[in-house]
Amino acid sequence: MFARTERLLLRPGWIEDAPALAQAIGEESVVRNLATAPWPYHEAQAMEFLAKPINPAEPRFLIFSRTGGAPRLVGGCGISPAPEGGLEMGYWIARPYWGLGFATEAGRQLVRIARAMQLPRLAAGHFLDNPASGAVLRKLGFKPTGAVAKRYSLARGGEADCALFEEGDADDGAVTPMRDRIGVDEDFRQELRLLAA
Protein backbone atom coordinates (compact mmCIF):
# COMPACT_ATOMS: atom_id res chain seq x y z
CA MET A 1 0.00 0.00 0.00
CA PHE A 2 1.27 3.45 -0.94
CA ALA A 3 -0.15 6.86 0.00
CA ARG A 4 0.66 10.39 -1.11
CA THR A 5 0.06 13.71 0.54
CA GLU A 6 0.89 17.20 -0.68
CA ARG A 7 4.55 16.85 0.36
CA LEU A 8 5.03 13.21 1.33
CA LEU A 9 5.04 9.65 0.03
CA LEU A 10 4.22 6.86 2.49
CA ARG A 11 5.26 3.38 1.40
CA PRO A 12 6.41 0.11 2.95
CA GLY A 13 10.13 -0.12 3.62
CA TRP A 14 12.34 -2.32 1.49
CA ILE A 15 15.69 -3.94 2.37
CA GLU A 16 17.34 -1.48 -0.03
CA ASP A 17 16.17 1.32 2.31
CA ALA A 18 18.37 0.08 5.17
CA PRO A 19 21.22 2.61 4.74
CA ALA A 20 18.83 5.57 4.47
CA LEU A 21 16.74 4.29 7.40
CA ALA A 22 19.79 3.86 9.63
CA GLN A 23 20.95 7.37 8.79
CA ALA A 24 17.50 8.96 9.30
CA ILE A 25 16.64 7.30 12.60
CA GLY A 26 20.18 6.91 13.91
CA GLU A 27 20.16 9.71 16.48
CA GLU A 28 19.52 9.07 20.13
CA SER A 29 17.20 12.09 20.29
CA VAL A 30 14.91 10.32 17.79
CA VAL A 31 15.16 6.72 18.96
CA ARG A 32 14.68 7.43 22.66
CA ASN A 33 11.13 8.60 21.91
CA LEU A 34 10.20 5.19 20.44
CA ALA A 35 9.23 2.03 22.30
CA THR A 36 10.77 -0.74 20.21
CA ALA A 37 13.78 0.76 18.40
CA PRO A 38 17.17 -0.03 19.95
CA TRP A 39 20.02 2.36 20.63
CA PRO A 40 22.49 2.49 19.04
CA TYR A 41 20.68 1.99 15.72
CA HIS A 42 22.83 0.91 12.79
CA GLU A 43 22.24 -0.58 9.35
CA ALA A 44 21.98 -4.09 10.85
CA GLN A 45 19.02 -2.98 12.99
CA ALA A 46 17.45 -1.30 9.95
CA MET A 47 17.78 -4.50 7.90
CA GLU A 48 16.26 -6.55 10.73
CA PHE A 49 13.30 -4.15 10.96
CA LEU A 50 12.75 -4.06 7.19
CA ALA A 51 12.85 -7.87 6.96
CA LYS A 52 9.95 -8.29 9.40
CA PRO A 53 6.69 -9.36 7.77
CA ILE A 54 3.93 -6.75 7.72
CA ASN A 55 0.49 -7.69 9.01
CA PRO A 56 -1.98 -6.16 6.50
CA ALA A 57 -4.18 -5.05 9.42
CA GLU A 58 -1.17 -3.22 10.96
CA PRO A 59 0.33 -1.17 8.12
CA ARG A 60 3.68 0.52 8.55
CA PHE A 61 5.35 2.99 6.25
CA LEU A 62 8.53 4.88 5.66
CA ILE A 63 7.88 8.57 5.04
CA PHE A 64 9.63 10.25 2.11
CA SER A 65 9.58 13.90 1.13
CA ARG A 66 8.47 14.34 -2.46
CA THR A 67 10.86 16.60 -4.31
CA GLY A 68 11.90 17.38 -7.88
CA GLY A 69 14.61 14.70 -7.50
CA ALA A 70 14.76 11.42 -5.66
CA PRO A 71 12.52 11.21 -2.58
CA ARG A 72 14.34 11.65 0.75
CA LEU A 73 13.53 9.44 3.77
CA VAL A 74 12.33 11.74 6.55
CA GLY A 75 10.59 9.38 8.99
CA GLY A 76 8.30 6.45 9.59
CA CYS A 77 4.78 5.73 10.86
CA GLY A 78 2.52 2.79 11.45
CA ILE A 79 -0.23 1.06 13.36
CA SER A 80 0.54 -1.65 15.90
CA PRO A 81 -1.07 -3.40 18.90
CA ALA A 82 -1.29 -1.17 21.96
CA PRO A 83 -0.08 -2.61 25.29
CA GLU A 84 -3.50 -1.80 26.77
CA GLY A 85 -5.27 -3.60 23.92
CA GLY A 86 -6.60 -2.34 20.61
CA LEU A 87 -4.44 -0.56 18.05
CA GLU A 88 -2.25 2.50 18.33
CA MET A 89 -0.50 4.74 15.86
CA GLY A 90 3.11 5.75 16.10
CA TYR A 91 5.49 7.93 14.11
CA TRP A 92 8.96 9.43 14.10
CA ILE A 93 10.65 12.14 12.07
CA ALA A 94 14.39 12.48 11.47
CA ARG A 95 15.89 15.38 13.40
CA PRO A 96 16.72 17.62 10.38
CA TYR A 97 12.99 17.66 9.51
CA TRP A 98 11.55 18.51 12.93
CA GLY A 99 9.20 21.48 12.96
CA LEU A 100 8.16 21.25 9.30
CA GLY A 101 4.77 19.64 9.92
CA PHE A 102 5.74 16.25 8.44
CA ALA A 103 4.55 14.27 11.50
CA THR A 104 1.14 15.93 11.34
CA GLU A 105 0.85 15.45 7.58
CA ALA A 106 1.87 11.77 7.73
CA GLY A 107 -0.24 11.14 10.83
CA ARG A 108 -3.31 12.62 9.19
CA GLN A 109 -2.82 10.28 6.22
CA LEU A 110 -2.28 7.30 8.54
CA VAL A 111 -5.57 8.02 10.31
CA ARG A 112 -7.33 8.22 6.92
CA ILE A 113 -5.84 4.85 5.99
CA ALA A 114 -7.10 3.35 9.27
CA ARG A 115 -10.60 4.71 8.58
CA ALA A 116 -10.54 3.38 4.99
CA MET A 117 -9.51 -0.03 6.35
CA GLN A 118 -12.36 0.19 8.91
CA LEU A 119 -9.95 -0.39 11.77
CA PRO A 120 -11.17 0.35 15.30
CA ARG A 121 -10.48 3.80 16.70
CA LEU A 122 -6.79 4.26 17.37
CA ALA A 123 -4.93 5.00 20.56
CA ALA A 124 -1.61 6.82 20.78
CA GLY A 125 0.81 8.05 23.37
CA HIS A 126 3.97 10.02 23.94
CA PHE A 127 6.68 9.98 26.57
CA LEU A 128 6.17 12.91 28.92
CA ASP A 129 9.59 14.34 28.04
CA ASN A 130 8.51 14.57 24.38
CA PRO A 131 5.70 17.16 24.48
CA ALA A 132 6.09 17.97 20.76
CA SER A 133 4.56 14.57 19.98
CA GLY A 134 1.57 15.45 22.16
CA ALA A 135 1.10 18.63 20.13
CA VAL A 136 1.05 16.54 16.93
CA LEU A 137 -1.54 14.17 18.40
CA ARG A 138 -3.79 17.10 19.35
CA LYS A 139 -3.53 18.50 15.81
CA LEU A 140 -4.65 15.09 14.55
CA GLY A 141 -7.76 15.23 16.74
CA PHE A 142 -6.54 12.83 19.43
CA LYS A 143 -7.71 13.56 22.97
CA PRO A 144 -5.71 12.96 26.15
CA THR A 145 -7.31 10.23 28.26
CA GLY A 146 -5.82 11.72 31.43
CA ALA A 147 -3.97 8.46 32.06
CA VAL A 148 -0.21 8.13 32.31
CA ALA A 149 1.24 4.63 31.93
CA LYS A 150 4.70 3.20 32.29
CA ARG A 151 5.93 2.17 28.84
CA TYR A 152 9.14 0.32 28.14
CA SER A 153 11.57 1.98 25.74
CA LEU A 154 14.24 -0.30 24.31
CA ALA A 155 16.51 2.65 23.52
CA ARG A 156 16.18 4.03 27.06
CA GLY A 157 16.71 0.60 28.53
CA GLY A 158 13.76 0.95 30.88
CA GLU A 159 10.31 2.33 31.52
CA ALA A 160 9.25 5.94 31.19
CA ASP A 161 5.98 7.76 31.82
CA CYS A 162 3.77 7.90 28.73
CA ALA A 163 0.68 10.11 28.31
CA LEU A 164 -2.14 8.16 26.65
CA PHE A 165 -4.44 9.53 23.97
CA GLU A 166 -7.51 8.27 22.11
CA GLU A 167 -8.74 9.13 18.65
CA GLY A 168 -11.24 11.96 18.71
CA ASP A 169 -13.75 13.04 16.09
CA ALA A 170 -13.11 12.12 12.47
CA ASP A 171 -10.75 14.35 10.49
CA ASP A 172 -12.65 16.84 8.38
CA GLY A 173 -9.82 17.00 5.85
CA ALA A 174 -8.86 20.54 6.84
CA VAL A 175 -5.22 21.43 6.59
CA THR A 176 -3.58 22.54 9.82
CA PRO A 177 -1.49 25.61 9.05
CA MET A 178 2.15 25.55 10.10
CA ARG A 179 2.58 28.01 12.93
CA ASP A 180 4.45 31.15 11.91
CA ARG A 181 6.32 29.36 9.14
CA ILE A 182 5.32 31.41 6.10
CA GLY A 183 7.66 30.58 3.25
CA VAL A 184 9.28 27.60 5.00
CA ASP A 185 7.66 25.02 2.70
CA GLU A 186 8.99 26.68 -0.45
CA ASP A 187 12.41 27.31 1.13
CA PHE A 188 12.56 23.64 2.15
CA ARG A 189 11.52 22.45 -1.30
CA GLN A 190 14.18 24.66 -2.90
CA GLU A 191 16.81 23.29 -0.51
CA LEU A 192 15.84 19.72 -1.42
CA ARG A 193 15.92 20.57 -5.13
CA LEU A 194 19.47 21.83 -4.70
CA LEU A 195 20.48 18.72 -2.74
CA ALA A 196 18.94 16.41 -5.36
CA ALA A 197 20.63 18.22 -8.27
Image (tube, helix red, strand yellow):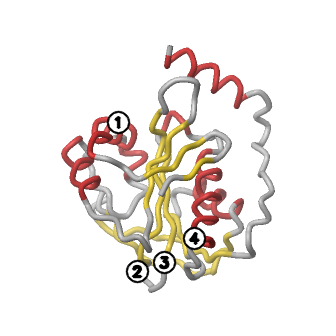
Q: Residue furthest front?
A: 1
Name the image quarter holding residue 99: top right
Judge by depth and name the residue closer to the eye, 190 or 116.
116
Relative side of 35 to 175, left or right: left
Q: Which residue is mark 1?
A: 20
Q: Earlier in the sequence, mark 1 or mark 2?
A: 1
Type of amino acid at the residue the image marks with label 1: Ala
Of tags 4 and 1, which is closer to the observer? Answer: 4
Question: How packed is label 2: few (under 14 Cα within 10 Å), some, or many (20 or more)?
Answer: few
The residue tagged 3 is 87
Q: Residues within 10 Å of mark 1 (few under 14, many from 20)?
A: some
Kindly report the distance in space between the C-alpha atoms of the residues bearing marks 4 and 1: 26 Å
Q: Are marks 4 and 3 in contact (CB under 8 Å)?
A: yes
Q: Foreground: 143 or 20? A: 20
Q: Secondary structure at mark 2?
A: loop
User: Percent from the top left, x then y, of residue 195?
Assistant: 50, 18
Residue type at mark 3? Answer: Leu
Which residue extends farthest left?
Answer: 44
Mark toward the viewer: 3 or 2:
3
* Circle count: 4
Q: Closer to the N terminus: mark 4 or mark 2?
A: 2
Please determine whether, in this image, residue 66 is positioned above or below residue 107. Answer: above
Question: In the rendered structure, which amino acid carries the disc numbered 4?
Answer: Ala
Q: Secondary structure at mark 3?
A: strand
- Mark 1: secondary structure: helix
Residue at 36% from the left image edge and 45% from the top image edge: 28
**Image point (77%, 27%), residue name:** 183
Hey, what amino acid is under mark 2?
Pro
The residue at which mark 2 appears reads as 83
Above or below residue 67? Residue 139 is below
Residue assigned mark 4? 114
